[in-house]
Image (cartoon, rainbow, N blue to C red):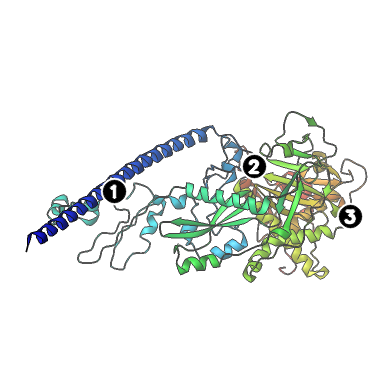
Amino acid sequence: MDAQEAAALRRALAESQAALQAKDAALQAKDASLQAKDASLQAKDAEVISLTQQVQQLTVQRSAERQPVPLRQSNLRPLQLMSARHTGTSPSKSSGSQSYLLEANGMALYSPGALPLLRELSSNCFPEALAVLSSSQLLREELLYPLMTAYTPKWIDPIHRPAELMKGSMTASTLHKIDSDAAGAIASFGGFQLPWSCKPELLAPAKRWRRPFAGELKSVDEHMLEELATYAMVAMQAALFAGAPPGCATFLSSPPVAYCLAGFPFCGFLLAVEWVGRACVYPVSRPFFLGSDEHSKAVAALLDYNYEAGAVHLPLQEPVFKCWPEEKEEEVVEESAAASGGSSSQTATAGSFAADLSKWRVAWTVKPIEQLRFRSEGRANSRSSSRSSSRSSSSSSSSSSSSSSSGAASKKVFVKVTSARGASQSAFRRMYEAYSALAEARRLEEVAGPAAADAPPASLLPARLLFGSGAVAVEMPWCAGRDAVLEDFTGGGADFWGPIAAALTWLARHGLLYTDLRPPNVRLLHGTGACAEGPLAASEVVLVDYDDMVLCKDITSLEAFEAQLAAAQQLLWPQGSTEQRFPEPYTGRYPQLREALQQPSMQWARASES
């Protein structure tokens, strides 16, 4: 190799070294840049954590200071779940919180309060052992401990644990009968030590030389259901209640329902949120892996429904509504007695009904309004949905046809609105059941025709229940006249008590028990009554206000009627509570009514059952 070749090689080597040094410097610069970015990201993470903590602190602080927000503002967050035990206390006692908007104890799948379509969807997706729990209870691990050992491998002999957080727990060494010395003597490689003092939640003692079985439950924050229901209610307001004419509120002939996906890491299930005064949450599918075929099938099974044809717009400004509780300012004397419910001793509050929808619980018209008309019921988009929705939609279609056939009187109606603050969830459930059953009974009698000989008496009015955003409304024909008074009840004869007895027995024959019989719930048309001269015609005594009716069965005698009435009144208004309304069945207070109910013309069983 000559000198020139050696020099060329040295130059090439120097250039290679220079290139490598340059690349190394570039890599070092990139590494420094990445380190700077990583530091920046860590700083941002710390900032996010700090902001999250501040938001949580502010949320807790504001939750304690929060005041009720009017429904019309559509501001439903944050909500508080109410316990399933919250059935005997008025929702007005909830410390001014928004909790009355959401009661999610509707997870009890076998409760008759669920919509027919939801019962069809969820009839087989939950075991009965879970169906007795409220939705908030379903999220608490300790209540599900007994179910962890409901099914175990056949070679395992589990220890069944009660539904309490600490009761029945034991350490792993106690469970598997391995003391600390024996555990320490086990040869384990890698330098790790297992915590034999831990407390397994599924109590399945290990069996020698067999495959063990273990389990773990983790509680889920119940705000998950709260947020799901909130998102669903916001979407229902956008889809079903927005766009009403100025000064009006939209009401629907069928309960509004939305579907939700409750997802956990890699698995989930579907829920339905049903809004009948208050929102209820129901599971409507089995659990599935997200993105799986089961996920696809569960979503495909959801039932569609078109609410447009069953929507009506209730005017909020005119006529004047009477509100309870009332405002103290700008009171005006009621021009005519309230029809179909409410006490005539109260005064109406001008404009307060629409001015602030959060300050009253119940409101009703004190002047007749035009009948709320809409087209025929919306049709579900599947045959199965049509079947499952028929019972719920009959509440409006049947009563609508009944009121339309009643002549000129059907053009003027009475409307009573009960807001979410006005009743508990269980009361809204009973209202839905009662009005649906009443409409179905009328529909069946209309289909049977005159040959059935069991048409509703004139003393029983057609009524339909409508569903709004955080409220329900009852529409029934307007009855000109006056409320009955105590003198009518104590001095009334057969002309007064006969129509009432006919209404009570007709309802009992059709599985409905009227519980709230008192003077304001009886209307005397044209102002006549026991305190006026002349007998009453059967069509001049009308029983109204069906909100507190309950379902009943097997009433074949007056004695059975009184027994179920006493039980229903104790359920609705427990003795000794602030809500107690009747110390005894009303048949014991009014012997003239009992006498009327004993007449041979008062049949307790339907002709087909006699």
Instruction: State the image coordinates of residue 540 (x, y, percent, origin top left).
Output: 87, 50
Between 473 and 576, the one lying in front of the other is 473
Q: Mark 1 or mark 3, which has the lower sequence index?
A: 1
Disc 2: which residue: 71
Residue 408 numbered tag: 3
Looking at the rendered structure, the secondary structure element under dot 2 is helix
Q: Identify whether 68 is placed above or below 101.
A: above
Residue at 55% over, 67% down: 300
Residue 435 numbered tag: none
Instruction: State the image coordinates of residue 529 (x, y, percent, origin top left).
Output: 87, 44
Number of the front mark, 1 or 2: 1
In-image side of 386 versus 490 (left or right): left
Q: Which amino acid, mark 3? A: Ala
Residue at 47% over, 34% down: 58
Distance from Cα at disc 3 to Cα at disc 2: 35 Å
Residue 30 numbered tag: 1
Quadrant for the N terminus in the image: bottom left
> Looking at the image, do the residues carrying marks 1 and 3 touch, with CB atoms under 8 Å apart?
no
In-image side of 233 versus 149 (left or right): right
Looking at the rendered structure, the secondary structure element under dot 1 is helix
Looking at the rendered structure, the secondary structure element under dot 3 is helix
Q: Which amino acid, mark 1? A: Lys
Number of the front mark, 3 or 2: 2
Distance from Cα at disc 1 to Cα at disc 3: 87 Å
Quadrant for the C terminus in the image: bottom right
